[in-house]
Image (cartoon, rainbow, N blue to C red):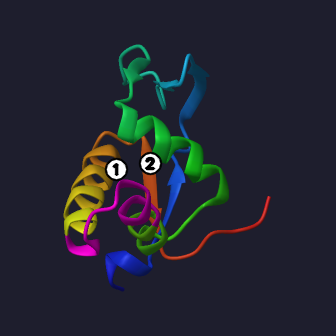
């Protein structure tokens, strides 16, 4: 499946707060073999995306939102958003999935 059609959700092992507009994300250890929790302070872009993840958007939707808000080309937005999502996914801050279930 093309990454643009995948959904982005907050990582299952995260807890977060928005403090003065900045997302502070705690990545909780998944077991005794992992060190203490890690704390991330997201950039302005990351903090904005973090808020949008409440709705479990598709990558394509995040790109469209960013392109419109920042008044940049969709191609430029796609390059930046996809790279950023891949970094967050590698750090286990977000999950990129084929489908999302209900709560």
In depth, the one of 34 and 84 nearer the eye is 84
- The mark total stands at 2
Mark number, residue 50: none
Q: Residue at x 45, y 55 (%)?
A: 95
Spot occupied by residue 50 in the image (x, y as percentages of width and height): 51, 42
Name which quarter of the figure residue 100 lies in. bottom right
Instruction: Reply above or below: 58 against 42.
Output: below
User: Does residue 66 belong to the magenta stretch?
Assistant: yes
Q: Residue furthest bottom?
A: 1
Q: Main secondary structure of the magenta part?
A: helix
Q: Residue at x 27, y 63 (%)?
A: 72
Q: Quadrant of residue 38?
A: top left
Q: Position of residue 18 (x, y in %)?
A: 59, 24
Image coords of residue 82 (percent x, y)? 27, 62
| Magenta part of the chain | 65-75
Asked whether residue 12 is drawn in magenta, I would say no
Query: Where does the image place residue 75, in percent across and percent down from the top left?
Result: 21, 74
Say which label, 2 or 1, has the lower sequence index.
Answer: 1
Which residue is depicted at the point 38% across and 23% down? 40
Give the left or right position of residue 73, taking residue 35 as reference. Answer: left
Which residue is labeled 1 in the image?
Answer: 89
Q: Which mark is residue 94?
A: 2
At a point 36% along the width and 17% down the height, the residue shown is 35
């Amino acid at each position: 499946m093309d990454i643009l059609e995948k959904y982005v959700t907050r990582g299952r092992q995260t807890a977060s707060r928005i403090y003065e507009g900045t997302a502070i994300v705690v990545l909780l250890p998944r077991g005794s073999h992992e060190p203490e929790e890690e704390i991330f302070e997201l950039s302005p872009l990351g903090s904005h995306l973090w808020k949008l993840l409440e709705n479990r958007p598709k990558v394509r939707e995040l790109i469209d939102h960013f392109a419109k808000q920042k008044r940049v080309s969709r191609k430029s937005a796609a390059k930046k958003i996809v790279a950023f999502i891949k970094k967050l996914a590698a750090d286990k801050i977000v999950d990129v999935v084929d489908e999302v279930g209900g709560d």
